[in-house]
Structure formats: structure tokens, C-alpha cells
Image (spheres, coloured by chain):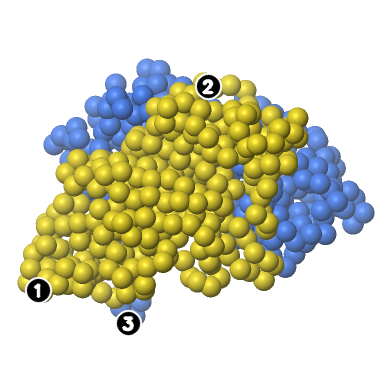
Chain colours: A blue, B yellow
Amino acid sequence: MSEAGVTTETLPAAAAASHAAGPTATAGLVAVEDLTLHFPVYQGLLRRQVGSVRAVDGLSFDIRRGETLGLVGESGCGKSTTGRALLRLYKPTAGRIAFDGHDIAALEGEALRAMRPRMQMIFQDPQASLNPRMTVGAIVKEPLVEHGVLKPAARRARVRELLDAVGLNPEFVNRYPHEFSGGQRQRIGIARALALDPDFIVCDEPIAALDVSIQAQVVNLLLDLQRKLGLTYLFISHDLSMVRYIASRVAVMYLGKMMEMAEVHDLFRAPKHPYTRALLSAVPVPDPKVEATRQRILLKGDIPSPVNPPSGCRFRTRCPWAAEICADREPEWRTLEDGRKVACHFAE
Amino acid sequence: MLAVRDLKTVFHTQDGVVHAVNGVSFHVDEGELLAVVGESGSGKSVAMMSLLRLLPMPPAEIASGQVLFQNRDLVSLGAAELRRVRGARIGFVFQDPMTSLNPVFSVGYQIMEPLRKHMGMSRKAARRRAAELLELVGIPSAAARLDDFPHQFSGGMRQRVVIAIALACDPQVLIADEPTTALDVTVQAQILELVRELRRKLGMAIIWITHDLGVAAGIADRIMVMYGGQIVEHAATADLFADPRHPYTRALLDSLPGRHGREERLHSIGGQPPLLMAEPDFCPFQTRCAHAFERCRLQDPPLEQVAPGHDVACWLETPDVGGRRDH
């Protein structure tokens, strides 16, 4: 936890207390066990439940304090749902989410609200996540007002400080979001996420809507802030080359399950899961020499429905190396010698 | 095959005239894939939509230029004649397959429509050809899926259907506007492989609009980099990546992660793209360029050859052209 900006006294009592009670800095900030999130599917006149979308289906992983965990996968794999469940924007169907030693999976009401300042989110589309009728100052100030942090005069000073921290001119407090470019709007979203001095930020595709030259600006800003404030990030993205750059570890999801999780260097150098291999081989490389010679693993078919996922290993219907055992038995989420985790019968 | 000369497209808006495309000239040959690379607002889509006059006019207006195709100028062609070119001789694939397919007609009907309209095929012949086309673009059990509706296909399969429609009348030129941007990477890889295969089989010219330099590196013969409504660099793919000359191209390549290993910071390009509320008489990149000097603010550099097949619009590369020397 950084002391930049808001001091501990100004934080809500519950959050401040949890700091004192929290475990040491070496332990994981977030520990997830068997996290499951099913959305019911209703049908017919009586809206009877006929099944469920198994968006997230038994994830176990941890996020270390101060690290950036990259979460990658294709649309519909459940990566955004996972991010939102960690922040308790959804109530998990089952499983445990330990945030700084406290199980928040079942928290409700005021107890949950007291935890919220410590976990924030940066959204994909800054256009959609900023209220067009509020000034930039009001947007960034809202979390402070909402949680009763600081006195009005101190809030104004804090807003200016936050705008300055994300590289926006503090004189712009009275402007509206439409007066800013896409990259600047994303900076406003980041300033808002920083307002309550959080420890953990879920970045859900924060650069996907931005142009290449602007993406670099925002990524540099996120890294600077992490260094300065000791932030922990969950960086959700489909852009593998950017994840490779920003993340310390990477987790790969497919159809609600985690396929592989490893140190970024190990994952990109030698992916163990067939899906990770296919995914990495599909990323276009901005170098015509590499593109002309590389071997691609082209996957056949489409992602199956999460309402009725394949038996055994979920990836088996598209896996070039699938065998009989893959349909019969679900692969265990196991740890390999080099410490990485993988869910495949054949990985070694 | 298709040659464009000094194309200028403007938009008449409430705030004034936006000069979206400012004097773009290029050509594409038979069997060739030309990638057009640029960021949002660079004018890449507007330029290519202008070729077939696909923009709503007004507010858009093609202020000047020629689009020469089969010895005719598409800019001055009558509406009825232009319709015979669109979708028949020149096919178009857009970014989002869901917006280019009509949700209330079966995909078979939508593939048969151009066949019946442009080629005058009978219903039966058109249906047979539609099944062939779906098979060509790699849709399993093609004939059985003709009566399915767009929502019954996945995103990647829908884009294959759109490509099948664009290919229906055997076009000489295919214009694809960010056709894989809305797709996942593994699906994108499938579509790119399909396009490589179709090029070998059909030998048409392809203009591929993309913001992704990685995609361009993988499929293009030549690349045209656009910025501020102009072509700033144009070269064979290998030359562009090996020896980028324009400061914008270099900055764009530098801003990609992983090109120089895991260095401390990404190189970002400061500032914003120009608004183009006036036709620029200066280099459009000068406000963001680290090497800009006085001349860049006074004169717009022309696109000049700096090596065989390699053109650049930058005063640093071509100091001796343009008449006046201001420094």
C-alpha cells in the first residue's frame, strides 16, 4: 500500500483496519480458490431455468502483491467475468476469493462496501464509462464523495493532484469528457480509479479501443503508476504482445477454465498447453521475415457453447493432439517442475 | 488494374469542411495485395470507400481526382453503371460482418442476390454457385447451411460468408476494410490463411485496410502508410520493415511492444493526429515529429521516390524537391 496522496487516517475505518491485520507483503494479495460463476438460462412461459452459462468454472490462482497478472483468452472465455467477480461486481456461484487475507466471496452490504475502495477497475471504452454530463472534476471526485473521504476543499486539491499524476492538465477540471481524445479519456478513467488510493486494479482491456501510438502512452502511464504507488494489476487483454510487455505472469483462459499460468518469460518461450501454443502462433508479428517462415497451428472449428461444454478437457474438440483420455477425464490443474500450472494430460 | 490519381475527399460538417483525404495516388496490380496502414482518422477507410463512392454524399464529396478501372473513371461514372461495378467487378468486405449481413435473409439468399442481379443466373444455378462459394471460403457442409440465417453462424464464419458474397461475381479487385479486426486472434489466423489461399486460386488484386502492422507484415506485397489524409510512405513490405524512412512509420514501429526486446519503456508518439479543418499546406505529422524543422511547417512534402519502389513524403528524405528552399 502506498502512502502517496491520501494518508491512512483519511481512509474508511474498515479498510484502514484491514491494513493492520493484513498478512505480510510477500504473500498473495488475491487468492482465488475454485471460483465458479454460472449465469442461469431461463426459457418458456414460466421462465423455468433450463440450464446455465458456465462463464467461469472452478478457477484457482493467486495474484502477488505488486505484480501484474496478465489474463488472456478469446471473446467469451470468461476473462472479463473473472475480473468482475474478483471485484465482487458479481456474486460468485461458488468458491473463495481471499483479498489481503479476508474472504470477500460472500460479503454483503456495508462490509463489502468498506472493502471497495481498495479494489478498482479501469474499463475498456472510456467513452462509455465516463458520464458525458459530468465534468472531469466531478467524475474523478465522485469516489471520494461516495465513500466520504476528505473534506470538500481537500477533495478539490486531491482531484488536481490525480489529474496531474495521470498527465492531464489540472486546469481541465471543468471540461467535459467529449472535449478529450480517446487516450486522454482513458487517463480520466485511470485518475478516477486511483482516487481512493487502491491496492488492486482490474484493467479490463484498457487499451483495446485506442490507436497503437496512444496505447504506448497509456501502458507507460500504468507502469509508472505501478512503480510509484505499488499497485497490483490484473491486466485483462486479448493483445498478447502487449501482455508480454506489461505482465510478470500470464494466465490463459478457454471456455471458463484456466489452461495455463506461468511466468511471462516461460509462457512465451515454451508454452506447454496446446491452446496456449495455438494462441501464440496466431498472433501476427510485425516482421515480414518472421511471418514468412513461422509455423502456425491453425485451430479447426469454433469455440463450443459454454452452456454445454465438451466433456473432459474443454479444449479437446479443437485440440490437434486430443486423445481418448481427453474426452473421458478432465485434466487436473497441476503444477509442473518449473512452477508453472497447466491443465493438460500430456503437458510436461 | 486499378489506378487512383490525386484523390481528394472532403466532408461538409457543421463546424466546417474536413479534409479527410488530401491528394492520394496509388495503383494496385493483378494478383497483388496492397495493405493500407494507418490509425483512426488517417483517411484510409474514407479513401477506399471513395473509390466506389460508398460514402453518403452529402456530407462527403469527392473534391477531385480520378479512379481508373478498366479504362473508365469511376468518379464520373453514372449511378447505374457504377452499380454494375460495385459488388461485381470490385468486391467489398467490411469490418463487422453483422452489420454487412442482413439478419432477416438466409445467407444463401444473400450470396445468390449478386449472382442473379449481376450475372443474370437462374435461381437454380445461383444456388449451386452459392454452395460452391461457401465451400470455397471453408464453411463445413456448405450446401446444408444455405438456408441458415446470419445469427446461426459464429463471428469468424459470418466473415467467411461476407467474403463469399464479395467473391460471388469473380471480382477483379477486392477491397477489405479491417476484415479481421473484430475477430479473435485464432479466428483471424484462419481468415488470413483463407485469404492467402484464395489469392493463389483466384489471382485477384486485393486492397487490405488495417491498423495492425503485424497483419500487414504477414500478407501484403506492398504497404502504404497513411497519416492525416495523405500517403506518407509506400514500399514493398520487406523494405518498409527493414528500412522505414518516414518519422511516422518509424515511430509507429517503435511504439509496438517486442520489436526491440523488453526495454524499459515503450516509445509513444506524443500529441494528437491533426484535425484537418483546412487543407494542410504543411506536413501533417510536423506537430508530433521529433525531427520537424521550419520547412515542415511551411510546405507539405510531396511523395517522392527515395529508392526503387520506395516513396516517402518527408523533407528530411527529399530536401531538393518542391522548388523553394526555405532553410
Task: Give the letter of the chain under mark 3.
Answer: A
Residue at the image point whose x is 57% and y is 32% from the top: B246
Q: Position of residue B252 (x, y in %)?
A: 55, 35
Find the residue positioned furthest to the right.
A153
Q: Which residue is labeled 3 in the image? A: A45
Question: Does mark 1 fall on the same chain as mark 3?
Answer: no
Query: With respect to residue A335, does A146 lie above or below?
Result: below
Quarter of the image with the C terminus of chain B is top right
Q: Which of B199 and A50 lies nearest the eye of the viewer?
A: B199
Circle number at residue A296: none
Q: Which residue is mark 2?
A: B260
Choose mark 3 or mark 1, whichever is in front: 1
Q: Chain of mark 2?
A: B
Q: Residue at x 24, y 27 (%)?
A: A346
* Foreground tag (2 vs 1): 1
First-in-chain label (2 vs 1):
1
